[in-house]
Each structure stands twice: as structure tokens, then as C-alpha cells.
Image: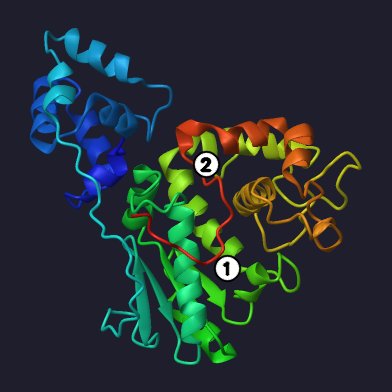
Amino acid sequence: MKTARSHLYDYDLALDDAYHFVYSNLNNPQIIYESCLAYGVTNSMLAEIVNTKMSGVTKSQVIDFFASHEIDSNDLDATASVPVVSYSTPDFNVLSHSDSGFDWLNRKIDVFGIPLYAAPDVGEDKLLHSANIMAQWLDNNEDGLIDNQGVLDNLIVNKATVALWAEDTDTDLITEGMQQFMMDLGSEETRPEWHLKGHTGEFDASLEELWHLVTQTGYAYQYPEIFGEKVGSSLAKSMDIARGGQFVEIPDQYPESAWYTYDDPSCDYGCMNTEYMYWGMTSILGGQENREDEIRHEWKLNTKDLVQSTDPTLYDLLTDPQYNFPTVLPDGSYNLIG
């Protein structure tokens, strides 16, 4: 189901714009109804719009609001077109480009509408590997179809971007040109060989950084009350238990009972959610089995069984079929079925 946010993006409108229009016309519901009909806004989308400033408004309440004014808003759901962001199956062609603001990154690969750029000194093998990892995070069964369209919609609406760098000067340029949802990835930390060596040796950080982008920019926006990186979301409530308390700031010392004890001072509460979701997902998929000693200072549940037995709330969230999460750890070899 497409969100109001991504739907309005097609018309160059923001949620705040739509909310203020609705609020200013509460005494004239016919105008609200006709505008929704014209722009293909469904009852569910209208509830989402109102919930940007309020909370708890449901689709049923929207329908009841219109009904109280003798307007049958079921037509909004019956006739609304629900377009999705267009994309093509990635062909992994390395392209030169003239994209504004990215001229210092001389190559790119497009993956389902998400651009991955590379600085001149980044090896083509690293760019291709990262693109394949991204494709597998988004289309985990490799059938050429996005596993969760709403997540991709939000990635594209938020202009999610990846920038691969090789030199310190590259990171300076990234900092200068950083967009809100640009993920930087170092060439040296992108390690295809980790997959070939049975998940041993230096870890392939492209798994982590690209998954961060998908969750921060996709899942957190598609399901804000579930995976939102904020106090009170389902993910955050689970994380608070894992950390032994609701620590908006990193504590001087975590409780002994905690199994998630990340202590990077640059990581705020939202960032803590990002890392928590990463540790949970990659542990469930088998990516941390050989890293117990390396990671236990911040994450103690390095296997699927440990996550399921110790953090069942997180396990249930990340294996709930309604969210179409990956079920296989990406390895950098996206092979389109058929």
C-alpha cells in the first residue's frame, strides 16, 4: 500500500501542506472530499495526513467524518489510483553521469531507482559488489520484484543515495555535499571476500551500511509507529528492554542484564534504533555467527536462536511476514530468477 507521503510526492506536495489544507477546510468537508478525489488520496492516506499533527486517527474515523456530513467517502478507495514509484530491474551497468551535486563521484549504478556513486579511486569491483548487496536487500528472493514497495517508495521520495569513497579527501567532499539520506561507504570496508571465505576474516561492512539506509529511510518512514527511530515505536520499546532501560543518552554503564550495549557517543537515540535493527536482522540471517568475540562488547545475541530466545519481541518484529523482510543474508551475487 502506498503511503500518503510518497503519493503526495508525485504531485510535489508535502504532508504538512496537505494537513494545513485539511485543517483549514474542516468546516467544508465537500472541498476536502473533492480534492482527495481529484488527487487520488484514499481514506487511509487522509488518516495518515491528519496524524502528522494529531495521533490515533483511523481510516474508519475519516469515513465516519465524511458520513456525518452525508458524504460517502468510500468512493475515494474505489476510484483512487495508487501508482507506485517506477523502477527497472537493475542491470548493474557502470555509468558515467552528470548528476547535479555529484560531479566528484565519476561513476554510478542504479539499483531499483537508488543511485550508488563511486569516487574515482574506488575499484569497480567494490561498486558492483555494493550494488548487488543493495539489490539483494530490496529484492531478497531475486525475482525482479521489490519485496516491499512502500519501503522503496520512501527510499526514493527521501532521495536515498550511496557514496563510495577511497581516500580521506573523498570523505571531505562527502561531508560538504552530504544530503539528508546519503550513506557513505568506504572502499576498504567493502569486502566481497568475506562471503567467499565462509563469513570469516574482515567483515563486509557494505551489509551494515546499506541495510542502515534501507531501514532509516525506508522502513522507519513506511511504518513509523512500528519501526520509527523514536521513543515509543515498537522497535524502540524492544530496544529499551535490550539496553536495560530507556536511555535517551548513552549511560555511564549499562545494566548487567543488557544484551545491547552500544556506546558510541556520536550515536543518538534514533541511531541506536538503527544499529539495533541491524544487529537483530543480520544475526537472524546468520551474518554474525562467527563474530561473537568481535561484537560482544555491543551485541551479545550473535545467532538466530539467541535472538529468538533472548529478544523474542525483536525476533517477532523482524520475521513478521507482513513486512516482507529479507530471509537470506545478501552475498553480493544478485541473480535474477528466470
- For residue 206, the mark is 1
C-alpha gap between disc 2 and disc 1: 22 Å
Which secondary structure, mark 2? loop
Residue shown at 67% from the left, 59% from the top:
267
Q: Is residue 20 left or right of residue 178?
A: left
Q: Position of residue 170 (x, y in %)?
A: 51, 87
From this viewpoint, is residue 201 visible? yes
Q: Position of residue 127 (x, y in %)?
A: 47, 78
Which amino acid type is marked by label 2?
Gly
Q: Are marks 2 and 1 in contact (CB under 8 Å)?
A: no
* Nearer mark to the viewer, of 2 and 1: 1
From the viewer's side, name the closer residue of 330 and 206: 330
Q: Earlier in the sequence, mark 2 or mark 1?
A: 1
Which amino acid type is marked by label 1?
Ser
- For residue 264, the mark is none
Is 36 placed above or below 187 here? Answer: above
From the viewer's side, name the closer residue of 319 and 54: 319
Residue shown at 18% from the left, 14% from the top:
66
How many residues crowd around disc 1 within 10 Å: few (fewer than 14), some, or many (20 or more)?
Answer: many
Q: Is residue 327 left or right of residue 102?
A: right
Residue farthest toward the right in the current orientation of the protein: 256
Q: Is residue 111 left or right of residue 210?
A: left
Which secondary structure, mark 1? helix
Residue linked to disc 2 = 228
Is 111 placed above or below 125 here? Answer: above
Q: Position of residue 106 (x, y in %)?
A: 37, 87
